[in-house]
Image: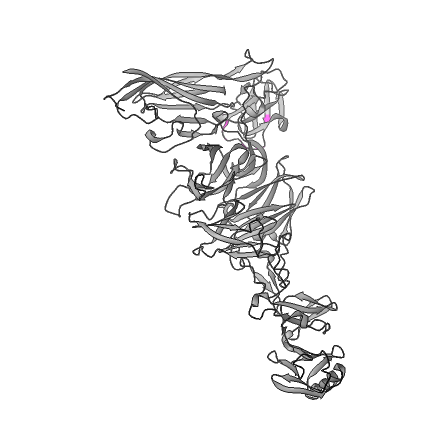
Amino acid sequence: MAAVSGSIPNLIGGVSQQPPEIRALNTSTALTNTWSSVVSGLGTRPGTEYIGALGVPVPNWKTPATHGIMKPSGTYMITVIDSQVFVVDLVSGTLATVTVEDGANGYLNTDDAAVNIRFATIGDTTFILNRSVIPAVTSTPESGLYGIADEEVVRLNPNLLATHWVKQSAGYTCNYTVYLNNALLANAATDQSPETVTATLRSAMATAGSSLTEVSSTITSISLESEDDFITATDGFGDQATLGYNDYIDEFTDLPNMDIGGRLVMVKQAGDEEGDDYWVWRYGGAWQETYGWGAYEKPVPSTMPVVLKDNLDGTFTLKHMDWPGREAGDADSNPTPSFVGHPINDMFRYKGRLVFLSDENVLMSQKGRLENFYRTTCMQLLDEDRIDIAASESRGAELVGARPFDKGLLIFSSTDQFYLHGDNEGVIGPNTVDMDLVNTYTASGDLQPIGVGPNVVFVDDPEEGTSYYSQLREYQVERVFGQQVALSITDQIPEYIPAGIYRMLSVSQKSAVILASSGDPSSLYCYNYYYNNDGKVQSSWQRWQYHFNVLNVVLVADALYLLISYRDHLYVVRQRFSEAVSPKLTEEDVLLDMRLSSEDLSVSYESGKTYVEVPFPIPDLDHIVAVVAPDSSGSIPKGQVYKPSADSTDTKLIFNRANLFSEKFFVGRTFKFDWEPSPIFFRDEKMVVVQDGRLQLSQVSLLFNGSGPFEVQVTPPSRDTYVKKFTGLTIGSGGDTLNTSSLDDGKAVFSAPGKSDKVKIRVVAETPWRVRFSSLEWSGRYRPKTKRTT
């Protein structure tokens, strides 16, 4: 057998469930509580820090929704659960006061808030959507002669009024006639002035029983007995001398400059296009645009998203929004928003508009007036008017999510992708908007897609009952031909992420994606990626496991804030990302879950014991430690670790023979770093596994840097597991300055005898300190069965 050796230059390929022979060289069989970085290698995930408590028990069978906001007034996490709204100050950990007006929290009633509740923060206002509520409108009926009053002016029924106007004299004897329902009502044959003609016709109409109101010396308002009645006027001057109109007129310029207050008239403009009609009424001594008779409507506030208002004094108010209604036009010229009668599936802000996705439609509010989904004028179509556009090729599937992409919006249904865009300059308005079908990938209807750099990541969740695992795709412009494609980023882990993903976050600063799934409530799934000029060079998956259940998670200022269930109560913890490339220990290197600083705790010392009171009950003392902070100014060596004594209680930790009263220290729960490398194979110069022959491993070495203690567990085929421990931590080493401590660099060498693909290697660590590995080398002996030829 010939002596051979090999190496894995980096260990950041993540988990792979492919057959070991075809896996990428740097992938692993299992990774738990790890972080894969092109900068620092394979290391320990960040710990979590205790922030505060919501003070309520976990509601049975109900999931919470969370949202983070960061503004000059403060940094907060909003939580909606069981129709309640909680706002946690993420700096102090305290609950802000939330005042509820007019039962606005009733709109938030849903058992699955994690899926059904969406947020959009704009300035000091956060819109909160319940996707399970169907919006409705309320209308104000108008009947009889009198309609809605605006201050002291009452709208008059245009179907019960007519107006007659003698505009001019013909200059010769001319016949002027007025007809009621095509029957002659009044007639005047004269060459007199318009005033005289008007007086003659009025007298005849009054004699015939008409109810008249004198508007001016030449304008008469005529009351009609039935809405089916109508007035027409003719003259012997080519019908240019008189005008009679009822509920409509062809052109606005045909209207007289006077009529009775409240008179309502439709201006038809182009007679063959109903959509360009508009209504005017006589108000304030002028003709002003208004809405049609009986056409007023507005969204019902209790069926529309509510708002959480930041009062800028540490308090918040939850209330209904006054959503504007139809202020102009009617159902033809200013249609009811298409979300009425259909659930709103998504809500977000885009280019100064509030956007709703509902049924097959994308609805964008008026630009600069986020709450208005009606046109403000029907006299012309303005660029800032609301947009209501349907996906004409949606195959009946509802639109469920969207993300900015390539100067437009990438819109998702459960079966298709559409591209919504404006003109060549990127301006989106009702005159320029268009939406095209661009692809046909299936997508989850319960999860918003996220941006990952210029690309969009979405979940391709299976239909219920067809699979227990989720798949993800990354939508992008393909580099060679410029086509839009959605490539799978979970090909190597087809049965890894449990179905039921309800939260997906992009940590762009750290090139990571974080997933939360109801199928594994005690874990988060982390995806590390990295691009260079050659494209994506890292695509790494791993699982973060906790001793509590994660109910939801938000990203605020590049830190994760987890809403957790712990001992049947709700708490908030923070998880900050840090590469920690320096070997010198800092407080960020103390990796514990539910970590608390002694500066925030009640600490006392009595009779050789230190007593520490914690704000939450601790069920398992075996994993609880106190760690003297690397920047502590006391006499105890920095980095010293203490275990609580068995007589500690749920909320009071006791440390025997340790005076921590004058020290700065951290208390928390350790967690386990667990890494199982992929089996090792003998490969040719093209890195293809050589199947002929046998590779007998003898020794493996791991290059570690800035690493704390860890142990290697080796299980040769059909033999017991062998464990070798490496200390890692060095206190006061030669390279350290006085009273500092650091983590070691070096090589961990251990035996791994046996057939290479059968030897199981596992690296574990459960200390307050990170571990970190950069590469792996191996040596052994190889015996081929046959001679290979090229």
Q: Looking at the image, is 292 positioned above or below residue 734? A: below
The furthest residue to the top: 734
Q: Is residue 11 left or right of residue 734?
A: left
In which quadrant will I find the C terminus?
Answer: top left
Looking at the picture, how far across and down is residue 284, in whole percent?
Answer: 74, 67
Total residue callouts: 0
Looking at the picture, how far across and down is residue 646, in whole percent?
Answer: 51, 24
Q: Looking at the image, is 645 positioned above or below residue 465? A: above
In which quadrant will I find the N terminus?
Answer: top left
The answer, for residue 400, to whether it is visible in the render is yes
Looking at the picture, how far across and down is residue 303, in whole percent?
Answer: 57, 56
Quarter location, residue 143: bottom right
Q: Is 615 one of the magenta-colored residues? A: yes
Please report the bounds of the magenta region as a residue range: 612-621
Q: Main secondary structure of the magenta part?
A: loop
The answer, for residue 707, to whether it is visible in the render is no
Q: Looking at the image, is 787 positioned above or below residue 198? A: above
